[in-house]
Amino acid sequence: MSTDITEIKMKRLDDHVHFQATSANGQSILMDGSPAIGGKNQGVRPMETLLMGVAGCSSIDVVLILKKMKQSIDDISVHVTAEKIKVDDHTEFRTINIHFDVKGDIKEKKLQQAIDMSTEKYCSVSKILEKSAEITTSYVLNGEITPF
């Protein structure tokens, strides 16, 4: 097992729960709490960043895997939905669905393989989240709905 250190810096932007998170390479996102705890909807919620992470991680994997399979991708978008549950004093995701909308000259079997390889093997974020949530996937290829 190799180790790789990742660093994120968090800076408070107001007098309550509005923050800017910045990565080691200088990219940043804004985070804010819900209005119920004094947030002002000026950034994404921390739990939403987890879903953004799984969408990004799996999208990158699927694109790279399809390219290695010599499939021609014209466009890809991902829609993630999740069900949250209260556990003791915190919230967890119970279910997460990662839905891919892919366009291009792609064989359906190759797309299904790429999605499976991402969620079951390569996507670090889904591997972390699967410890507490059931992760499912679905897709549309060139406008044809084909859940699996």
Image (spheres, grey):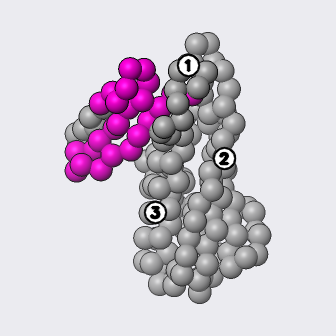
From where the camera sits, is residue 41 visible?
yes
Query: Nearer the observer, disc 3 or disc 1?
Result: 1
Which residue appears farthest toward the top when viewing the image? 88
**5 left or right of 101 in image:** left
Where residue 75 sits in the image (x, y, percent)? 55, 76
Residue mark closest to the camera, 2 vs 1: 1
Give the image quarter of residue 141.
Answer: bottom right
What's the CA distance linking mark 2 and mark 3? 19 Å
Whether 49 is drawn above or below 90: the answer is below
Q: Which residue is mark 1?
A: 37
Decide which of tag 2 and tag 1 comes sooner along the chain: 1
Q: Disc 3 marks which residue?
A: 61
Q: Type of residue at label 2?
A: Thr
* Figure check: 94 above or below 53: above
- Magenta-span inclusion, residue 27: yes
Name the element at disc 1: helix
In percent of width and height, residue 136 lies at 67, 50
Residue 77 vertical placement versus 18 (above, below): below
Of the two numbered discs 2 and 3 in the rendering, the one whose residue sits closer to the viewer = 2
**Count of marks placed on residues:** 3
Q: Amino acid at mark 1?
A: Ile
The answer to which of marks 3 and 1 sits earlier in the sequence is 1
Neighbour class for label 3 at 10 Å: few (<14), some, many (≥20)? many
The label number, if any, that marks residue 63 in the structure image:
none
Residue ID for mark 2? 81
Q: Please provide the residue range marked out in magenta.
A: 11-34
What is the distance, in whole Å, between disc 2 and disc 1 at their CAs? 23 Å
110 to 16, vertically: above or below: below
Query: Residue 113 location in percent, x, y?
Result: 58, 68
